[in-house]
Image (spheres, rainbow, N blue to C red):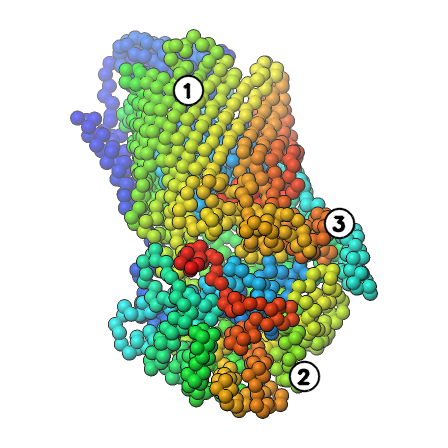
Amino acid sequence: MKKLIILISLISFVFTGCTKLDEVIYDRIPNNEYPENADQVANLSVDAYKRLQNLADDNGWWFLAQEISSDGFCGPTRASDWFDGGKWLVMHQHNWSNDVEGVNRMWSTFWEGITSSNQIIDLLKQLEQNDDIRAKIAEVEVMRSFYFYLLMDNYGSAPYLTTANLPGDFLPTKISREAIYDSLVTTVEKSLPYLKLTDNKLLATRYMAFALLSKLYINSEVYTGTAQWAKAEMYIDSLLAGPYSLESDVSAPFKTNNDRSSEIIFSIPYDEDNFEGFRIHMRTLHYQHNLTFDMPVGPWNGFAVVPTFFDTYEDTDLRKQQWFIYGPQFTSSGEEIIESITGEPLVIDPYLPALFMEDGAFTPAQIRTTGARAGKYEIKMGAKENLSNNFPLFRLTDFYLMKAEVVIRQGGNGDQWIDPIRERAGVAPWSGATIDQLLAERGRELWLEGHRRQDLIRYGKWENSWWEKPATDGSKRTFPIPKWAIDANPNLGN
Amino acid sequence: MIMSKLYLQIMTIVLLTVVFSVAHAQTGTVSGVVTDQSTGETMPGANVLIKGTLMGQSTDFDGKFSIVDVPAGTVVVEASFVGFLPASRTIAVEAGKTVTVNFSLVPDAIALEETIVIGYGVQKKSDKTGAVSHVTADQLNQGSLTDPIQGLQGKAAGVLITKKGGDPNAGFAVRIRGSAGYDSNTQPLFVIDGIPNADPTTIAPEDIESYNVLKDAASTAIYGSQGANGVIIITTKKGSFSGIKGKKSTSKVEFNHKTSFDRVAKTLNVMSADELRSFAQRKLEDALVANPDWTIDSIFTDGGADTDWQKEIYRVGINNETYVNFYGGDDKSNYYGSIGRANWQGVMKGTEKDRITAKVNLSHKAFNDRLIISGNLTSSFENNDYENYGGWGKEDIIYQAISRNPTDPVRDGNGNFDKTQREFNYENPLSIIENITNVRDAKRYMGNLKADLKVTKTITASVSAGYIRNDHEGTYFRPTGVFASADNGFASRYYSNYYSKVVESMLNYTNTYNDFHNVVFDLGHSWQESGYDGFSAQASNSQSPGIGADNLRSLVDVKWGDVNSYRGMSQLIGMFTRLQYNFNSKYYVSASVRRDGSTKFGENNRWGWFPTAALGWSMHNEEFMSNINWLDQLKLRASYGVSGNQAIGEYRNQAIWFPSGLATNPETGQQVISFQPAHNPNPDLKWERTSEVNIGVDFAVWNSRLSGSLELYSKNTTDLLGEYVVPVPPNLAPRTFANSGAITNKGIELFLQAFVVDKRDIKWKTSLTAAHNKSEFTDLGEFTTQESGVRYAGYISGRGMVGDSYFLNGIAVGQEVGAFYLPKYVGIVDGEFVYESREGGFTTKLSEAKRTFMGTANPDIELGWSNSFTFYKNWNVDFAFRSLIGNKVYNATRSFFDFPGNLPSLNGLPDALDWYEDGRTKTGPTIADIYLEDASFLRLDYISVSYNVNTDKIDWLSSLKLYVVASNLFTITGYSGIDPETTIDGLSYGIDQYNVYPKTRTLSFGINASF
């Protein structure tokens, strides 16, 4: 009996330990508690805009892919620097596979924007629907359409999804580029009445929607085979009637503090500390340019202007003088910069001899100091690794030139919309500008704003050869869907 | 919650103790002396007990015992001592009288009665049913050990301990039987003095009494969820009740001191200044054809000096280790204390480790020796001085030293560090060493309190509580002007804390029925909670080089993300029961079951069952074997068990949102925090399971002159924990953490120990460990495969190699873990590498090249051979060899440094000259099968010579030993790189990429004295 009591008390002694597991989450928000309060709800839609952050540099690749694949800009190999497995060269020479960094990352970045927008729309649809909520939903649908526009423009056919509430094993299938285009046009036009009619350069306003529709319609022939110049013109006119006006200074829309520029319709609000992601200056400036701009970091001496493009500017063109960095270079106090390897004063020679410059076939001076550099986006004194200049996604000047384009294509005369641009740039106006002249002017004016690839394709010049780029066939008008995406979802490979 | 539970259990013990007061009847006294038959000396500390009662005693320091209150009648008196055969006598006790019984104990056959430590208990070595390696302190490696675990290298079969290079600040990777998981941590569980999850660097190597390595699932399953990768139980030295055998005094003080000199064993043979100059001349000659007016300045700028940069960053390191311990005890309590200080001056300038350890172990008996309370407290204080060397950035000094142009001087004409700016990321490593501060201060504490109560003669109850606390604090400061490229300075401070609490309680029932049936039954419960928290702050643009990081207000630029804090926790609860039964030490059966729950897993699968069963047959105890005199032991064992692994981060089973950055709210223009989901929820996330079958043979022959064991095992690890990419949409986040896939490990281990020569004047003991393990992926499950069933791993990057095609390993069903998956190099055409292409032809594009599986970094055989010689009682010579055979290493250093295009601006290997002659101009650093080398090696780990001074005449000095140890004297290998040893851990390894802290050759001088 005694033994039994002992045994029972001992066993219960051992098991007075608990069996309840207690998990506490301290430094994250559990899914079932998000959003925690009204403020977080109000900020839900901000994430749709946050996904623009990666577009301008190699996290998202979009801006670089549009520019270094075109006839205006390139990423040359400078001996042991910048070869990087060929990822910059293949973009310029249209030699990419479905497994290069540019192709891989652009796809993820666009989908991050699309999914984030869909997640927000799903959350908003669960709330009580009132006018504010409906306006918010419309706004985020336009943002989603913007990401789909970039996706469709770069990759062609792709899946089209309007919600993020899908079963875990769902593998989406592609629809044609034309079908996506139709959906986008319908969605954006349907959202127009809900969008705000204000000059807010960071928000999807009704004007931003006009701009997006103009871009969709003007490229309609590329996307669907059928041109829609008249429709494009209708939306361009709505936009030109908006609260925007041309700046008198050709470089004003690209200054560090360009957030109130009268030309900018929609932009990405980069900031050197709080919203990083725009560092074109690091990629293009020479190693010692930190002396010119009092920078606390040393640039990487890479990207340069294609020399044949450099020659398309007249010498009096203010844009050539202000946007390109070439010639003798000086420190911030006016002294010559002595190149650390050649020992000579640093003089940037815009004549870039080749896309691939190996040690031994080119002199150190050629390798290190050739190719005009990009100074279009103001590099402020004391610039850090990231710029604070807002990146203009839609700029009024672009739509002036697009107006001229649709007019010319429909048989009219577009000079009145081209000449203000040319005069502002300090070159003589035209009379009876042709479509090819317009393309050249678009190249000069809209250089380094992410439009060149789309323009060359629309004008049928994408397959041409230029400088070190050979002629290619029509298969390079879209990028292939990346291999990693097809491996994760075989439906994308069909 | 813990406190109340502990309180409850303590009160229960107290209550039970009080209940058991012994009633006195008619009694007498039993007394006598216990002596050692082989020497004739008396034996203090021997156990004498009255069989069938709780009465007993340890002999005093004269070997005498006297047990009172023995009930009158016939009793059996038994005397025993570790290492001796027990002896018993049946006597008659008369009331009021004293009976004298003397014992003369016979030493047992060596080592068979040793005890080994198993999970939650001890076992006689002869009763072993699982695969356990037992290594005692005298068998460990000698020399200057930067971490205690280094002592175990090559000593336990199947335990592969590796470290790439010789950084005193870096740790070792331990892999038992090829344990591999996908994304989970595969280091074994360390249990130190009963505290699980302990950090072995907290204790001094001299504190260790033995290592017990539990290798098979049957032994580790009692640790349930934490045991899948093996368990290493470290027992530290303790005092013993009733002092030390053979000596008059009951306490001892030991003093150790060792001074070592470290030299770099081998550096990379990059070119000298003159070799580079003549190469530049060669390039000029070739360039003159197309450009006749070029001069040498068109090719490169000569810095004018002759610098061996590797020599500049290395030095002779001097290490000093001093250690004092003291221990002793009487029949009621014993103690052990130690304090030590070790300082390792790394051979790389700017690296150093300083460690102070202090330890106290106490034990106390009460309530008629029924209650034993023991506690231990260990603390270590460490200061580390670091240099970066893991990448190819501005601060990675090994890369900078190897690639830096030897014609550049160390200092320029003004005495300042030379800051020529030749390329991107081109910096003077000495400027970095001298100017950048990168230090850490670590404090580690470990404490345990345990109470063992002998409730009845067969039942023991115990409860223990343990606490671990590790606090790290670091400082980094870089003033302006360190780099040649622009930089305005940076400072950061951080602290990171970790704690672990354990409360465990156990019931043990040990009994023998009818003299033949030996039963041990355990019942236990364990509750653990671990957590961490940390804080960091950093800023750039330093305005005071003197203040540095000590006052972060001296820096200007702080932005979002510069200030950070974090915190997390997890809990683990387990219940287990174990039965060990043997019939007359001939037939053994044991079984255990453990049920564990962890907060890390999804709500559907929080709890798991981990059963084991084992059988053993001591054939040598059978009748039909009793005539075989030369056979001392022949034991067959078979076991099966299931253990689990949960070594992943917390909170992976649920979707959680984290602040990912700032964003501007377009409507208000205000900055807001953007929240994003970290990963997808997975309520089914569960234990990684390892099921293992182990068959073993233990044998000892010729009076244990030769003994050993052989193990054969097959392990199957399923439900591997890992992260895989999923399409978004439909998922919330692009990554899901889940269970999928399986790996098998099959192998054979052999351990042999022989006393080859055992004469009075010469003794030679040798031991050999050999192991072969083959690991294979049998299923990849959801871990999506990139192409035809192969998943890529082992990505490398560096100057000229940045991109997604630069991977070296392939993970595929049917392939070994860590298999290399490389393209075949065919030749050079037009300056470019040509590979075999997937379509069947040839290609110059790496992304199109056909890849083949080409061996693995896993060795086919691991060998360890230790020898110990004793001459004329005073001289000892020990040495140990270690070898890995059949392992391959990818020499990525050659990939990065053999491209002639980088020269003469940067330095490289002489291979570059050959490539230049072959016409390689276009293909930069790249991947190819030509860089895969056989890295089998044989290494003399250490050789030590020691002399024991005869202290018989000196009464205050108990022993004195002087010794010299030479470590890493030579290595025989065909590998062309700096060192063939790489860290074997994770899923992709065996990649030697120049960033290896050099291994050293060390000479140590030491003295051990005890008083």
Q: Position of residue A368 (x, y in %)?
A: 69, 66
Q: Chain of mark 2?
A: A
Quadrant of residue A187 within the rendered picture = bottom left
Relative to the observer, which residue lies in front, A303 or B385?
A: A303
How many numbered circles does the render carry? Answer: 3
Mark 1 residue type? Lys
Q: Is any part of residue B605 visible from this angle? A: yes
Label 3 or label 1, whichever comes before in sequence order: 3
Q: Which residue is mark 2?
A: A315
Q: Quadrant of the C terminus of chain A?
A: bottom left
Q: Which residue is mark 3?
A: B272
Above or below residue A425? Residue A350 is above
Q: Is any part of residue A54 visible from this angle? A: no
Q: Quadrant of the N terminus of chain A?
A: top left
Spatial CA span between label 1 and label 2: 96 Å
Mark 2 residue type? Asp
Above or below residue A102? Residue B717 is above
Q: Position of residue B143 (x, y in %)?
A: 60, 33
Q: Which mark is residue B635?
A: 1
Q: Are marks 1 and 2 in contact (CB under 8 Å)?
A: no
Quadrant of residue B264 within the rendered picture = top right
SS assignment at label 3: loop
* Relative side of B963 to A273, left or right: right
At label 1, counting other C-alpha atoms closer than 10 Å, the crowd grade (few under 14, some 14-19, many 20 or more) is: many
Relative to the observer, which residue lies in front, B327 or B786?
A: B786
Relative to the observer, which residue lies in front, B754 or A266?
A: A266
SS assignment at label 1: strand
Spatial CA span between label 2 and label 3: 50 Å
